[in-house]
Image (cartoon, rainbow, N blue to C red):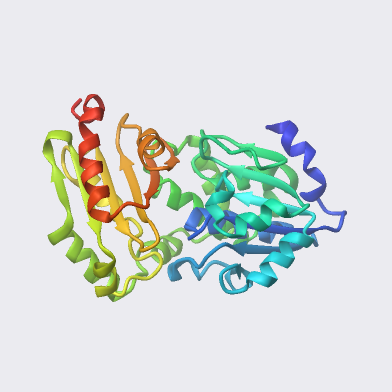
Amino acid sequence: MEDILESIRPCLTRGEQQKIVITTHHKPDADALGSSLGLYHYLNGLGKDVTVVSPTDYPEFLHWMPGNQEVVNFEVEPDRASELAMEADIIFCLDFNDLSRINRFGYVVGDSPAVKVMIDHHRDPSGFDDYRYATIHTSSTSELIYDVIAKFGGQEVFNKDMASCLYAGIMSDTGSFRFDSTSSDTHRKVANLIDAGAESAKIHALLLDNFSLDRFKLMGYVLYHKLEVIPEYNTALVHLSREELQQFNVKTGDTEGFVNFGLSIQGVVFSALIIDRTVLVKMSFRSSGQFPCNEFASNHFSGGGHRNAAGGSSNEKLEDVVKRFKRLLPQYATYLQS
């Protein structure tokens, strides 16, 4: 890992002038956008010509992040985003490890002559990158970006904008510091970010208390009508049709966190959210204990992720995906009934 960082030192220290693009996975969450903007602020401070390109839009509750107004949305400005990528000297690929995770922008990044640097914490990278700073043992990509910045800039380089973005990413991907991935080092880094200006209570409110009325109505509907518990397999399931999404005027980010509802139920160790997104049926999986969400996703739903948090997709009809999901549970009885 140290050797990798040394190999990319020129693009992380002041001096050489470079054109840099930072990109992250489609529909960025707080870790994806927070790590991207945290690195953006650092590189911008070094005098680099740097732009963040998002493959898609992202939730409005992330728009408060410093630097949000400078992000280029590939779906809105494909020509500009493509030109930036093709002219870049370096493309930082954050919080994803396969070009399919950035949708159509992946073809542009793949064709770009730029050096690709992956910084990520997910399993099974596809190998499109030239340099890789990655580990599955770190809470978030934002924590990895903290490590990179601290190594080359020192703790004194962190400012309020940088600290706020990285704090949001770490807080989100650790479930407000309650997931197993939260280490004592994570807390020490977060303390340093607070010292640098990150306002903990304010960021929590911006991420967790900043939703639309439509989302709350959808949440009530899901909890009362759609949350199903399969007690023999200690599993909770929510599935939503495209008609239900339209009924509640669902926008990007409105179903964020719904997959976690099931894990709040006594005895439930595996929770799934299955949504018909029109083009594909998308799935999110969460677990407690030893249930391998990543294996379940990769073996059956063209997905992947972490042991306790993963996702997948299918081009089947929603009702067929739900039926197949339920048929698979007996294969995992050892994990689900222990």
Q: 148 or 330, which lies in front?
A: 330
Give the left or right position of residue 255, taking residue 190 as reference. Answer: left
Against 224, is 125 above or below? Answer: above
Determine the residue positioned at 71% across, 53% down. Answer: 111
Residue 194 at least partly seen = no
Residue, x 72% and y 41% (percent of image)?
130
Of residues 273 and 214, the one drawn nearer to the viewer in this rendering: 273
68 relative to 131, above or below: below
The residue lying at 53 percent from left, 51 percent from top is 101
Which residue is at the front of the view, 155 or 225?
Answer: 225
Displayed quadrant of residue 129: top right
Q: Compared to 102, does 335 lie above or below?
A: above
The quarter in which the N terminus is drawn is: top right
* Residue 224, x across and y down, in percent: 13, 61
In percent of width and height, residue 119 lies at 62, 44
Across the whole image, how many numbered discs are drawn on residues?
A: 0
Residue 317 lies, in percent from the top left, at 28, 55
